[in-house]
Image (cartoon, rainbow, N blue to C red):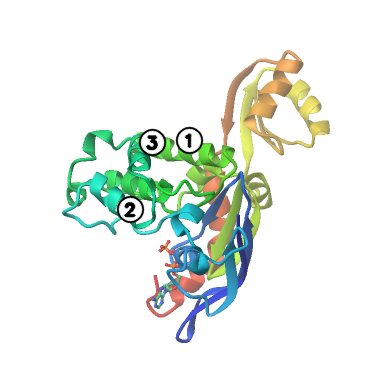
Amino acid sequence: MIEARHLTKRHGASVAVDDVSFTVAPGTVTGFLGPNGAGKSTIMRMIVGLARPTSGTVTIDGRRYAGSPAPLQQVGALLDAGAVHPGRTARNHLRTIARTHGIPDRRVDEVISLTGLESVARRRAGAFSLGMGQRLGIATALLGDPDTLVLDEPVNGLDPEGVIWVRQLCRHLASEGRAVLLSSHLMSEMAQTADHLIVLGRGRVIADASVADVLARAGGGTVAVRTDAVDRLADFVRPMGATVTYLAADRIEISGLDADEIALAASRIGVTLFELTPQRASLEAAFLGLTEDSVEYRSGSAGRA
Ligand SMILES: Nc1ncnc2c1ncn2[C@@H]1O[C@H](COP(=O)(O)OP(=O)(O)OP(=O)(O)O)[C@@H](O)[C@H]1O
């Protein structure tokens, strides 16, 4: 579990992180979202002791990282996938880190297999593609079998198969009771991976809620439905808390229920659905809507990313 309390980080006169508090609970994937320069990486670096907060605290399972007797076993982090000695093979890179932290070589082979790196484990890490480098970074994060994981943009550079793999891995790690914090620019990807979202803008927390709540607040989360029984379906789902908008004689948009709940509701009353489409575009709109002000501020400020 990660607990950040009133975290602030200043660089000279500029404030990168401004009084941020949040909790990453065990058994959940928590998504860190925000435009460039929102403060995501800075917070992640403070979590693992690579940057010092100007004020405030962050603890992992109640302890500060800096004082941890076994840091890799406490938290695994992917912060800069490029941080590998280019001449070393992937296996040797992992073995070197494992030995420094008292982790057996057996675990190195386990993480190589877990991250699908078997075929390239004897190749020099310097010749790795961006995607392979990401996998190696994730393997490093998993070495200590930690209860907490901090992954900065883990899908960066991965092909679609790799993106799905990261999604399933994060879900799996959370299902084992671990606390997983991951950052991404991709709202749609995050909505499929995370249980909970922390949206940052201008170094502050803009939203800290479940994925469904963030979408609902931003007016997203609707599902387009085509059926020849729109009225029957509308009458049935409204008492379940849904809001229905009529688009055409055979087409409605439903919010307040997800696609699975709508499919189950329709089958319960014998209504056939010809289309059931979560409105993905609205996920991006939700993100843009939430962070609009902070992006405008950034664009207008002196050359900052
Ligand atoms: N060492 C530093 N010196 C000065 N300013 C810094 C330093 N590190 C970060 N910043 C600034 O702090 C703010 C937050 O940056 P950070 O990298 O944490 O954002 P981010 O949300 O991770 O962005 P991105 O998605 O682009 O990685 C930015 O305005 C950045 O320019």
Q: Quadrant of the C terminus?
A: bottom left
The amino acid pointed to by label 2 is Arg
Extreme bottom residue here? 13
Say what secondary structure mark 1 lies in: helix
Query: Which numbered mark, 1 or 3, is in the foreground of this view?
Result: 3
Query: Which numbered mark, 1 or 2, is in the foreground of this view?
Result: 2
Q: CA distance from mark 1 to mark 3?
A: 12 Å
Q: Which residue is mark 3?
A: 114
Please tell me the numbered disc located at residue 99: 2
Residue 215 in picture, x, y percent from top left: 63, 47
| Left or right relative to 222: residue 116 | left
Asked if the residue at tag 3 contacts the one at tag 1, i.e. Cβ–Cβ closer than 8 Å, the answer is no
Total marks shown come to 3
Asked if the residue at label 3 sits under 8 Å from ligand 1, the reply is no
Q: CA distance from mark 1 to mark 2?
A: 29 Å
Q: Residue at x 48, y 35 (%)?
A: 168
Say what secondary structure mark 3 lies in: helix
Relative depth, front residue between 101 and 173: 101
In the rendered image of this protein, does residue 123 appear above or below residue 84? above
* Mark positioned earlier in the residue sequence (1 or 3): 3
Q: Quadrant of the N terminus?
A: bottom right
Q: Quadrant of residue 87?
A: bottom left
